[in-house]
């Protein structure tokens, strides 16, 4: 699993870099501190970094895993393909709010979760559909909804640059206030239902005389409550028309997203 992390990070570097290459004019308005927009990295240098990252990811995955792990190869190839289609013309899915949201939800919520879970289960000796059990599907569902939150929120602080570039994001069409409110409601609902759900499961385990099963479930319930409290606190006094404030809140949402990964081993 650790070896699989290296090509995953390289693919993420490729996707992120490609997005900055094609969004450089937008970023000069929305995010002038980014390396290319700020002039610290040339377009040629950015292209070299992206292509080297992509090449290293392919070489690494085939060197260590060869044709043995179809799940890993599909996950990496699918992420790279959708990441390319999201940013690069002629497809450039980000021009459509629905296609952009679809791309983010599929990659962040479904492809990465199910693909790497399948790969991990293969390492434990499972084969075929045995790799997709309730834990994997539940995790994919959770992060799929979280991917929706990210898709709804990511363009809120970028309204000005998107308008100038002709990108008709949902934040441009409906207004940043509507999108920020919608995203936060979905996030709070997700974390609240997760906390309640694992609390009920913990109670069921206690009633069944399984305290060792109840303990990780209680821990997950408390972690979800912490995430909810943290998100509510971070959202306090955020003005949807203040890009810096919204972006700071958006980064806090990512903290909850990655903290959720750390809780996955407790899911029972």
Image (cartoon, grey):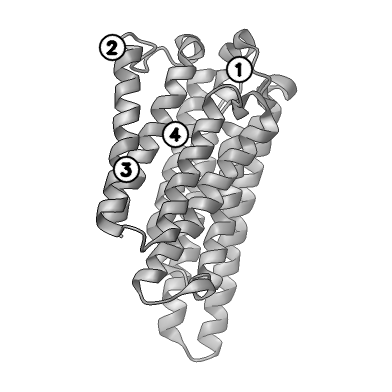
Q: Are marks 2 and 4 in contact (CB under 8 Å)?
A: no
Q: Residues within 10 Å of mark 1 (few under 14, many from 20)?
A: many
Per the image, the residue denoted by label 3 is 57
Q: Which mark is residue 134?
A: none
Number of residues whose C-alpha sits closer than 10 Å to that of mark 2, classed few (under 14), some (14–19) or many (20 or more): few
In the image, is residue 155 above or below residue 111? above
**Which residue shows up at 61% across the image and 50% down it?**
145
Q: Nearer the viewer, residue 98 or 210?
A: 98
Cα gap from disc 3 to disc 2, whole angstroms: 25 Å
For label 3, the SS is helix
Q: Position of residue 81 (x, y in %)?
A: 50, 38
* Closer to the eye: label 2 or 4: 2
| Residue 23 screen position, x and y as percent | 49, 17
Residue 257 sits above or below residue 171 on the image = below
Q: Is residue 2 visible?
A: no
Residue drawn where x is 64% and y is 23% of the image? 95
Report which residue position mark 4 lands on: 251
Which disc, if any, is residue 159? 1
Considering depth in this image, is 180 or 126 the residue closer to the camera? 126
Marked residue nearer the N-terminal end (3 or 1): 3
**In this rendering, is residue 65 above or below 25?**
below
Q: Nearer the viewer, mark 3 or mark 1?
A: 3
């Amino acid at each position: 699993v650790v070896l699989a992390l290296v090509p995953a990070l390289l693919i993420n570097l490729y996707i992120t870099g490609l997005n900055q290459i094609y969004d450089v004019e937008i970023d000069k308005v929305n995010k002038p501190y980014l390396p290319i927009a700020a002039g610290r990295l040339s377009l040629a240098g950015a292209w070299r970094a992206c292509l080297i990252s992509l090449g290293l990811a392919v070489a690494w995955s085939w060197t260590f895993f060869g044709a043995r792990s179809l799940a890993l190869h599909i996950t990496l190839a699918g992420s790279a393909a959708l990441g390319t289609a999201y940013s690069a013309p002629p497809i450039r899915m980000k021009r459509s709010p629905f296609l952009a949201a679809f791309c983010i939800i599929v990659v962040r919520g479904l492809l990465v979760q199910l693909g790497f879970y399948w790969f991990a289960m293969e390492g434990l000796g499972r084969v075929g559909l045995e790799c997709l059990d309730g834990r994997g599907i539940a995790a994919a569902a959770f992060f799929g909804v979280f991917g929706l939150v990210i898709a709804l929120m990511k363009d809120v602080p970028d309204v000005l640059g998107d308008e100038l570039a002709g990108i008709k994001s949902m934040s441009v069409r409906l207004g940043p206030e509507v999108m920020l409110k919608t995203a936060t409601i979905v996030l709070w609902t997700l974390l609240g239902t997760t906390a309640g759900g694992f609390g009920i499961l913990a109670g069921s385990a206690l009633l069944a005389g399984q305290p060792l099963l109840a303990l990780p479930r209680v821990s997950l319930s408390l972690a979800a409550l912490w995430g909810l409290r943290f998100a509510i606190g971070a959202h306090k006094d955020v003005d949807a028309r203040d890009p810096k404030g919204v972006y700071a809140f958006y980064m806090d949402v990512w903290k909850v997203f990655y903290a959720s990964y750390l809780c996955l081993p407790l899911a029972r």
